[in-house]
Amino acid sequence: MLLARAPSPPPPLALAASYSTNPERALRIRITSSSRAAVATASAAAKPAASSRFEQKRKQVASVANPLVKHCVKLRLSAAYRRSCLRLLLVGLAPILEMCRFELDAIDYLLLLDGVEVPEELREFSGDIVFVSAAVMKKVSGMQSVDSTEAIAVMYMPRHFRDLGSHEDGVALDGLFNYPKRILVLDGIQDPGNLGTLIRSACAFKWDGVFLLPACCDPFNEKALRAARGASLQLPIVSGTWHDLHELTAKYNMKMMAGHPESSGDASKGIHSLSKELADALLNEPLCLVLGSEGNGLSSETLQACELVNIPMEDVTKLLLIKLTMMASCSFTGSLINGA
């Protein structure tokens, strides 16, 4: 469903029995053999803290040398490890609660700071809860202080994420899109905050998905996840090459356009100016919009494959002048009313 299909290993923290009746859930928790050993060791190291039916799911970890801690730190730091384990780390109670509005069962297990009560929104969580010391919370979160970090969730990789580099067949995208109208394509975006914000914007505008070309940072980087505010867990995200993108656009007969600075001289063909007429003409046409990297802009492949479009600077200047004039007028009127 996500990466290579293989039999499911026991899930972390001895949860195999919880998922044995759900084949689809079991399929989502496949991990490689090296990652399987790390998770199994982490499971054995997390010790039960009580004996009641609810408390049996509560574990205690106090040492930063615990294998579970090492596993979580590696999830935070390594994109390759995240994809091999099909897990990601979500740091902070606010983003966890934001995600819970969409899919509570996406959580594998939950780390809470010692002394913190289980939040009301997470009372229905049926997985393992691990209470950790302040030292462990700092180590896993990468934060210097735990004042604003009371919870960390280890989550399953979203079902609608595809890493096409992990597929050798041609059906990796089957079922992911249903005749998409708008896909945002990101070309070499390096800043995780920018990547997360763009994913959140695509979700807010109800686009159908995001396609990440090579050299983009990982969408499940902790900063990208924080900036996306849950959008990464809702929107289909595909990581692939230009060849994969061409196959996608050909399959759905999508037009390809790329944002390009008006002042840039590296375009060898004409550039369309964004206008109401252009927007109206594209209204019912399936479209991929490509945005380039912060420093280098669009790649040569994008420049060759796409029609280019820009927002004329004079229009931006006019809008700014109108806004400043309105602000000045309101300020002046307010002064007259107040007798200043």
Image: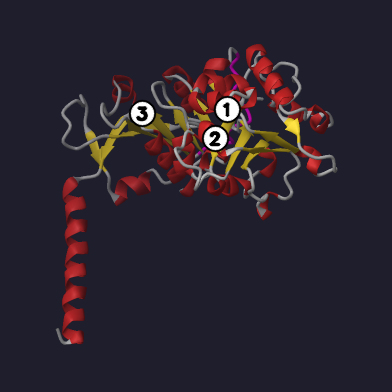
Name the residue beneath numbered marker 2.
135
Q: Residue 66 location, x and y as percent? A: 63, 24
Distance in Å between CA atoms under marks 1 and 3? 31 Å
Name the residue beneath numbered marker 3.
190
Give the crowd class for mark 2: few <14, some 14-19, many >=20 residues within 10 Å: some
Q: Residue 112 location, x and y as percent? A: 63, 42
Q: Is residue 261 visible?
A: yes
Is label 1 in contact with label 2 (beta carbons under 8 Å)? yes
Name the residue beneath numbered marker 1.
64
Nearer the observer: mark 2 or 3; the answer is 2
Question: First in sequence: mark 2 or mark 3?
Answer: 2
Residue at the spot x=60%, y=27% of the render?
69
For the residue labelled by badge 2, is the local secondary structure a helix, a strand or a loop? helix
Which amino acid, by three-letter code, is at mark 3? Answer: Gln
Which amino acid, by three-letter code, is at mark 1? Answer: Val
Distance in Å between CA atoms under marks 2 and 3? 31 Å
**Over which residues does the magenta segment extend?**
169-180
Nearer the observer: mark 1 or 3; the answer is 1
Q: Residue 99 location, x and y as percent? A: 59, 45
Residue at the spot x=68%, y=15% of the render?
37
Q: Which image quadrant: the N terminus?
A: top right
